[in-house]
């Protein structure tokens, strides 16, 4: 089907670009959160090893464990934000698609006749 016209899409288009930017930012936050989870997991493992050798205090273990838990929670939040941003982008994409006025069939109308393509 051929696009005959497009309704004014200034607003939907701007929202679409904004949604793309929000999605990209959300995905970057996931990557950052994944790195933080990896880093805090390593620190927690090292602290546990030091505890076994009596070279670290239980307070240090508590701190490392809490840091890991916070990082994991922030990663979960970032992943939810990606899902929300993707849903918003999908909605904006559908809104843009609805702005197109399409012919029901392909072809060219010429003086009372239809030439099918």
Image (cartoon, helix red, strand yellow):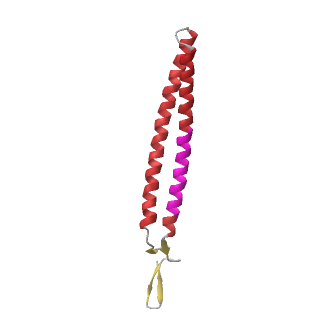
Residue 3 place in picture, x, y as percent: 46, 73
Specify whether residue 88 is painted magenta. Answer: yes
**Dominant secondary structure (helix, strand or loop) of the stretch shown in magenta:** helix
Depicted 23 relative to depicted 46: above or below: below
Residues in magenta, as a range: 76-94
Name the one closer to the observer, 13 or 114. 13
18 vs 51, left or right, is left
At a point 56% along the width and 33% down the height, the residue shown is: 72
At a point 52% along the width and 47% down the height, the residue shown is: 82
Give the residue furthest to the front: 59
Specify whether residue 87 is painted magenta. Answer: yes
Give the residue furthest to the bottom: 112
Name the one closer to the observer, 71 or 34. 71
Residue 53 place in picture, x, y as percent: 55, 8
At a point 54% along the width and 22% down the height, the residue shown is: 63
Depicted 82 relative to depicted 2: above or below: above
Residue 39 place in picture, x, y as percent: 48, 27
66 vs 31, left or right, is right
At a point 45% along the width and 42% down the height, the residue shown is: 28
């Amino acid at each position: 089907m051929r696009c005959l016209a497009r309704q004014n899409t200034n607003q939907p288009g701007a929202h679409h670009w904004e949604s793309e930017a929000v999605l990209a930012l959300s995905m970057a936050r996931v990557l950052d959160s994944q790195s933080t989870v990896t880093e805090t997991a390593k620190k927690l493992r090292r602290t546990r090893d030091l505890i076994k050798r009596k070279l670290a205090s239980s307070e240090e273990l508590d701190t490392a464990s809490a840091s890991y838990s916070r990082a994991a929670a922030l990663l979960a939040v970032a992943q939810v934000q990606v899902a929300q941003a993707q849903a918003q982008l999908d909605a904006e994409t559908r809104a843009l698609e609805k702005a197109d006025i399409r012919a029901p069939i392909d072809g060219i109308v010429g003086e009372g006749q239809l030439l099918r393509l």
